[in-house]
Image (tube, rainbow, N blue to C red):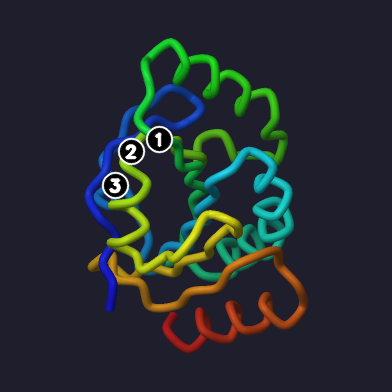
Amino acid sequence: MNTFPEVEGTNLDGQEFVLPRVFEGKLNIVFVAFQREQQLAVNTWLPTATLLEDLHKGLRYYELPIHSCINPIVRWFLNRAMRVGIRYPGSREKTIALYINKDLFRKALDISGEDNIHILVLNEEAQVVWHSQGSCDAEKAKNLSDFIKSVL
């Protein structure tokens, strides 16, 4: 079982966090995106994630856009662009941008590539207990919902 690595990030409201310590749920859904255009795939999951979070008190979700380590000026520009692009209510505070070594991050979570988004469900010990990738569809949404119901 893979464990989410300790990394630092800043949400789109400017608050700094250390992950996975900031994850508040008994279960945490984490949407990992490696490319800007993957936000569209993340957006397909947000109605399901919001509904599940409303139904289950012990569940939280987070969006994690992953970027390579870059200088602070470029980080500021990217964060500003993401703020403008993320319109889903409440998503800015739940979107934590990470500027990290992507290869080490992917290796820690056994993510083979950056071509798809990855949806991880983490338990309280930050262990990956459920994993999917790509856009949401009815089958994936049901699988996620069934898994969360079985745990919570």
Q: Residue furthest right?
A: 138
- The image quadrant that residue 91 belongs to is top right
Disc 3 designates what residue?
19
Please identify the quarter of the rendering in which residue 15 is found.
top left
Where does label 2 land, which residue? 100
Mark 3: which secondary structure? Answer: strand
Q: Nearer the viewer, mark 3 or mark 1?
A: 1
Q: Residue at x 24, y 50 (%)?
A: 21
The tag earlier along the polypeptide, 2 or 1, is 1
- x then y, percent, for residue 44: 73, 58
45 with respect to 132 (left or right): right
Q: Quadrant of the C terminus?
A: bottom left
Q: What secondary structure is marked by label 2? A: loop
On screen, residue 63 above or below 132? above
Q: Position of residue 98 (x, y in %)?
A: 39, 37
Q: Counting other residues with Cα less than 10 Å from the Cα at mark 1, is it few (<14), some (14-19), or many (20 or more)?
A: few
Q: How many marks?
A: 3
- Residue 144 is situated, as x and y percent measured from the top left of the image, at 58, 78
Q: Badge 2, how many Cα within 10 Å: few under 14, some, many 20+?
A: some
Cβ–Cβ below 8 Å for labels 2 and 1? yes
Residue 14 point in image, percent of width and height: 43, 22
**Number of residues whose C-alpha sits closer than 10 Å to that of mark 3, classed few (under 14), some (14–19) or many (20 or more):** some
